[in-house]
Image (cartoon, rainbow, N blue to C red):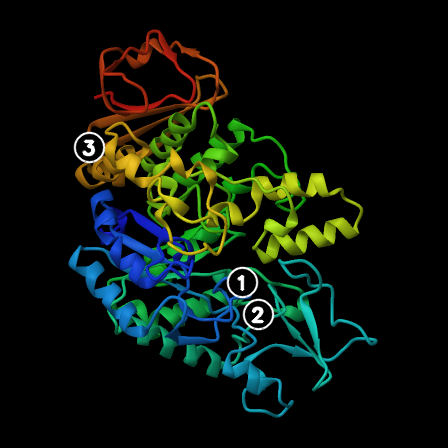
């Protein structure tokens, strides 16, 4: 595989609304991000994935776009955006834009025109169907609960929305739609951005009449056209959000010979704590054996025909330290464990804002505390279906999207230093102890663990190119793997348990030099090794 800059990169996701407020209105903004670029340079990241900052009425926190070539007023101006790109580039940090082109806002001028009449020139930019026996066209459902079809009184037809009814789906079969998208992407590429993260891109090839949403038959044809018409002539990173991807599907997206994308996000591992055949709210305990199986499969199955994205967290997922770690007794240890385990795998790691200081979920007591449309809709739907308030809140506090969206905790001042005003979403009360300032001051903090992991990736080709091998002769709750490259072998060990665990691996040798660890440990003897709760480390075997 030809080496690209993003093979050795570490990407940091910013959710702008919650990152840093610069003007006291309680909402993070572009000037706030600019103010914190030195912090991100210290961390060592290569690029920022910026969640949407385009003009939007905010029905789905910016993922409902009303103008792709304007900046949301709350976040600033196009001049602020250009300054951010410039200032980031001065620090060798690239800006990766969030590309949301499966749907627009219902306030986008295309949709405003489209709903005026059936013969409007923009009508075919969206997906319209006649009623069937006075009801919805078929049984397609929205990700945000209810039917995916919304009736439009003015023209007597339904339009498709796989998300909120204020997010009508674009009709990608219309060549004019695709040309508009290419034009918009080139507008941003010309500003010097470093690439695109592509929101639910696996849905753009949908065939709604056959109830096919993900991985439609023309999907890859569209992506190859996108590559030719836009970023194919630029040295940029492109990553697709593909919830239904298998390794074979991921190769279709990311095999360099196919000229589609750099990589995809697959989500098989994050669904391991939900009941089979159910949605994400139906919880079950995490099976560590399953986690090992899934992550190992993705490490080995792509070979040189694809590239992995590595992540635990994003703006749609709960904080991993709270979900699968222990955010009370072992908050620091388990946060570092997840970092060490993931960042020494093959692929491009993504850090979600606050992950590098071990930010945690913030459980709510009542639906009135929620902001996220998905959680609110689910709450109301399940309440109507006979679930108790208490059991619904258990699910929301475990998996709800607001968990990831509480403001960044910069210091121990009011509102964690995020804003001088009233924050748009509650700040986690633990900001007094969990914050950036405290992490920077402590050489053994979670931040400095992440910083060291990022440097290891830059300094050691084995982290980027090494083969992966799962070690199976260990206890079920111990995750151990090897990375091998040019006669060098590293071993990575992580104990997911809260009890001490003894390893007997005499064939692995003794007195191995520790590369990184989350407890004090200079050498490792595999003849008899006691692992402490959530202990993780990497050692050189040879």
From where the camera sits, is residue 306 visible? Answer: no
Q: Is residue 462 visible?
A: yes
Q: Which dot marks residue 486?
A: 3
Vertical comparison of 422 with 165: above or below: above
Q: Earlier in the sequence, mark 3 or mark 1?
A: 1
Query: In what element is the residue under mark 3?
Result: loop
Dots 1, 2 in contact, CB < 8 A:
yes
x, y percentage for residue 305?
36, 50
4 to the left or right of 52? left
Q: Are marks 3 and 1 in contact (CB under 8 Å)?
A: no
Q: CA distance from mark 3 to mark 2?
A: 50 Å
> Residue at (23%, 67%) from the top-left corner?
83
Circle 1 sits in a helix, a strand or a loop, which is it? loop
Q: Residues within 10 Å of mark 3 (few under 14, many from 20)?
A: few
Dot 1 or dot 2, earlier in sequence:
1
Q: Is residue 274 above or below residue 244?
A: above
Front in this rendered view, residue 237 or 35 = 35
List the residue tagged with mark 2: 167
């Amino acid at each position: 595989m030809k080496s690209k800059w993003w093979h050795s990169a570490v990407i940091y996701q910013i959710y702008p609304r919650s990152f840093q407020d610069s003007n006291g209105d309680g909402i993070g903004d572009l000037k706030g991000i600019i103010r914190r670029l030195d912090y991100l340079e210290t961390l060592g990241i290569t690029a920022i994935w910026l969640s949407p900052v385009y003009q939007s009425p905010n029905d789905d926190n910016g993922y409902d776009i009303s103008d792709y070539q304007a900046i949301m007023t709350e976040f600033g101006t196009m001049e602020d955006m250009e300054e951010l790109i410039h200032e980031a580039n001065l620090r060798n940090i690239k800006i990766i834009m969030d590309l949301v082109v499966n749907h627009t806002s219902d306030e986008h001028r295309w949709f405003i025109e489209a709903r005026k009449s059936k013969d409007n020139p923009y009508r075919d930019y969206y997906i319209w169907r006649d009623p069937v026996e006075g009801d919805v066209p078929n049984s397609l459902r929205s990700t945000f609960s209810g039917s995916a079809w919304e009736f439009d009184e003015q023209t007597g037809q339904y339009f498709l929305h796989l998300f909120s009814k204020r997010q009508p789906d674009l009709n990608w079969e219309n060549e004019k739609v695709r040309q508009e998208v290419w034009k918009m992407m080139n507008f941003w590429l010309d500003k010097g951005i470093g690439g695109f993260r592509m929101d639910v891109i696996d849905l753009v090839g949908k065939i709604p009449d056959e109830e096919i949403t993900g991985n439609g038959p023309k999907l890859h044809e569209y992506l190859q056209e996108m590559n030719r018409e836009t970023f194919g002539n630029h040295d940029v990173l492109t990553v697709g959000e593909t919830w239904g991807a298998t390794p074979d599907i991921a190769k279709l997206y990311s095999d360099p010979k196919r000229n589609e994308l750099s990589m995809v996000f697959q989500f098989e591992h994050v669904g391991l704590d939900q009941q089979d055949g159910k949605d994400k709210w139906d919880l079950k305990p995490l099976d560590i054996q399953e986690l090992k199986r899934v992550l190992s499969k993705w490490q080995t199955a792509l070979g040189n025909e694809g590239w992995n994205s590595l992540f635990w967290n994003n703006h749609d997922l709960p904080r991993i330290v709270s979900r699968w770690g222990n955010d009370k007794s072992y908050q620091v240890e388990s946060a570092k464990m997840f970092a060490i385990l993931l960042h020494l795998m093959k692929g491009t790691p993504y850090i979600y804002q606050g992950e590098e200081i071990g930010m945690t979920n913030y459980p709510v007591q009542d639906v009135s505390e929620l902001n996220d449309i998905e959680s609110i809709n689910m709450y109301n739907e399940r309440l109507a279906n006979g679930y108790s308030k208490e059991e619904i809140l258990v699910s929301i506090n475990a998996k709800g999207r607001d968990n990831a969206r509480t403001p960044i905790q910069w210091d121990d001042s009011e509102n964690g230093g995020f804003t001088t005003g009233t924050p748009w979403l509650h700040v986690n009360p633990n900001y007094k102890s969990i914050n950036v300032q405290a992490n920077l001051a402590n050489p053994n903090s979670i931040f400095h663990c992440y910083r060291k992991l990022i440097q290891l990736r830059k300094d050691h080709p084995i982290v980027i190119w090494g083969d992966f091998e799962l070690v199976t002769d260990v206890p079920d709750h111990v995750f151990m793997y090897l990375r091998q490259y040019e006669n060098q072998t590293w071993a990575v060990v992580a104990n997911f348990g809260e009890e001490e665990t003894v390893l007997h691996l005499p064939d692995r040798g003794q007195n191995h030099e520790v590369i990184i660890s989350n407890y004090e440990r200079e050498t490792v003897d595999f003849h008899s090794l006691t692992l402490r709760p959530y202990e993780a480390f990497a050692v050189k075997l040879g």
